[in-house]
Amino acid sequence: MKRLNLKSLIPNLITLSGLSFGLSSIRFAIEGEFSLAVICILFAAVCDALDGMLARYLDSESDLGFQLDSLSDFLSFGVAPGILIYMAIFYYENSNIGVFATLIFIIFSCIRLALFNVLHEKSKYDETQEIDFFTGIPTPAGAILILLPLTHIFIGYEWAYENINFVAGYIILISGLLVSKIPTFSLKGKGFPIRSKFAFLILFSILVLSMINLPWHTLNVLALIYLLTIPFSVFSWRKERYKT
């Protein structure tokens, strides 16, 4: 009987932990505990970042781990945020366009992950096809972005309830970005952008303190910063593609 390799199991265990957070988010959304549901999605995002980094660090990447990660992402960043935003904003308003928008987001999340899986398979046989950029925004980023109207409610700005159609249009726009061909930065293909350990520790400490004390404000700031990086990612992609 083949002995289990703990080193190869650790990334998959973290992936399953992220899946558990996604399932818990759905449960809290159904029970009306919307802030806890968002927090579970955030923890799932942390697990999603950690499992890949650990798999590369421990040299334990596998096809099983990749497929497991993709399925976990669909539930945690497609199904869970879709159900959450529906229950929190559209359910009590009986909004048909809200139902349509959340369905579009979940379906496009599935398509986006399927396309990424295809790209991953191609990269195995084409060494020149490196995944330095994502095509479209990744599903964790999409999940955070569609939840911003809900985080505004937590802060005290309840404009989302008065602008249901705008929120639905916003969700459809983010859904379109998931399956778009817009190149966005991927940390998986490049080295970590912060070289100084001291600078990293300072930024990490500030981020953790901000998330503990002002989680919803911090989340909105990070989302804004991410959106502002998209034009730079397009410029960088064009520069690398057309360089001689």
Image (tube, rainbow, N blue to C red):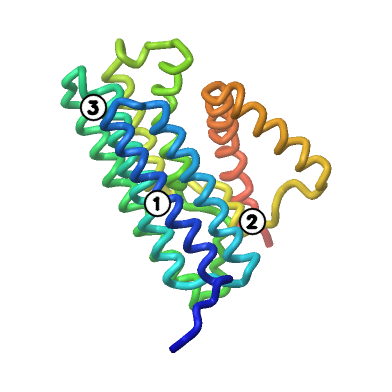
Give the label, 2 or 1, closer to the camera: 1
Q: Where is residue 232 drawn, in percent x and y?
A: 62, 40
Q: Quadrant of the N terminus?
A: bottom left
The dot on residue 19 is 1
Q: Is residue 19 above or below residue 9?
A: above
Q: Where is residue 111 drawn, in percent x and y?
A: 31, 53
Say what amino acid the circle numbered 1 marks: Leu
Q: Quadrant of the C terminus?
A: bottom right
Q: What residue is rendered at 58% in x and 22% in y? A: 214
Give left or right: position of 243 versus 13.
Answer: right
Q: What residue is rendered at 59% in x and 51% in y? A: 238
Disc 2 and disc 3: Cα gap in Å?
A: 40 Å
Disc 3 and disc 1: Cα gap in Å?
A: 25 Å
Mark 3 — residue?
98
Q: Where is residue 98 drawn, in percent x and y?
A: 23, 27
Give left or right: position of 128 versus 155.
Answer: right
Q: What residue is rendered at 49% in x and 45% in y? A: 45
Say what amino acid the circle numbered 3 marks: Gly
Label 1 crowding class (10 Å Cα cut-off): few <14, some 14-19, many 20+?
Answer: many
Label 3 crowding class (10 Å Cα cut-off): few <14, some 14-19, many 20+?
Answer: many
Mark 2 — residue?
240
